[in-house]
Amino acid sequence: MHMKLNKLELLKNSRFAMGLALLILALGAGSLIAKEANRTVYVWASATELAPGNIISADDLQQVSVLLPESAKSYISATAQVVGAVVTHRIGVGELLPVSAISLEPNSLDQRAVPLTLELTDIPIGLSRGEVIDLYAVPNLTQKSITEPALIIEQITVAAVSDKNNSGKAVVVVNLPQSILLTALTHLSDSRLLIVRSHY
């Protein structure tokens, strides 16, 4: 009888010790999780497609919490003011904003925003801000400067798109390098312009 009582006490003590050990493990795990959570930082991510030459607006930004203990300094903190900054490298939707892809200098890329008025049939369906395009000049009935389609410039960025203006045409604002601006304006005066998606 005494032996049975000892075994019973030993069993109770073993269960107590096991329960105590599990409790300690749970508290330790909770502490580690809380410690990891405290290492997360808030940074800016892109809410839209951004391409070189785009000017960042508030609608382009979304704040995200990420675990970046080592590389946090490579991305832009959500406390930083980046509205109005210029995009220097393409940033996809949902991507974190790298410090290296943003410039606070308005003329850092030496580009100018140029509005183009085009026929709705001369722009790709669903063209949107942030896309990279090629711009062509196509001869029309009164064309004098060119007699066949000519590439004006490739790999330029769409800054804004308006579905149509009062004349029923589309207005697309593109970022043109200063060096090509006069050539492009010459074609604007007497050419039919055509936009082609680059690497679509």
Image: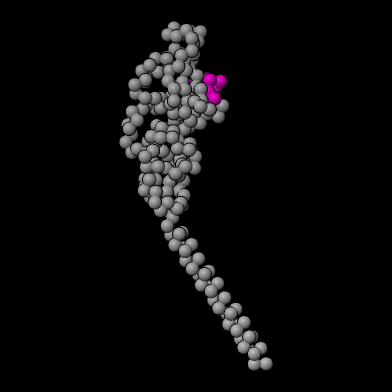
Residue 30 sits above or below residue 68 on the image: below
Give the colour scheme of this rendering: one colour
Quarter-wise, where is residue 100 in the image?
A: top left
Q: Nearer the viewer, residue 52 or 82?
A: 52
Q: Nearer the viewer, residue 140 or 98?
A: 98
Residue 52 sits above or below residue 60 on the image: above
Label tally: 0
Q: Position of residue 140 (x, y in %)?
A: 50, 10
Residue 172 sits above or below residue 66 on the image: above
Tell me if I can see residue 2 in this picture.
Answer: yes
Q: Position of residue 142 (x, y in %)?
A: 48, 7
In the rendered view, does 177 fall on the left or right side of 166? left
Q: Residue at x 55, y 29 (%)?
A: 126
| Magenta stretch, residue numbers | 117-124
Q: Nearer the viewer, residue 32 or 90?
A: 32
Q: Determine the residue located farthest toward the bottom in the rendered image.
A: 2
Q: Position of residue 73 (x, y in %)?
A: 36, 48
Q: Residue at x 54, y 22 (%)?
A: 120
Q: Nearer the viewer, residue 80 or 22?
A: 22
Residue 186 sits above or below residue 86 on the image: above
Q: Residue at x 52, y 69 (%)?
A: 25
89 falls in the magenta region? no
Q: Residue at x 41, y 32 (%)?
A: 52
Q: Determine the residue located farthest toward the right in the rendered image.
A: 1
120 falls in the magenta region? yes
Which quadrant of the rendered structure holds the N terminus? bottom right
Q: Position of residue 180 (x, y in %)?
A: 37, 20
Tell me if I can see residue 76 in this picture.
Answer: no
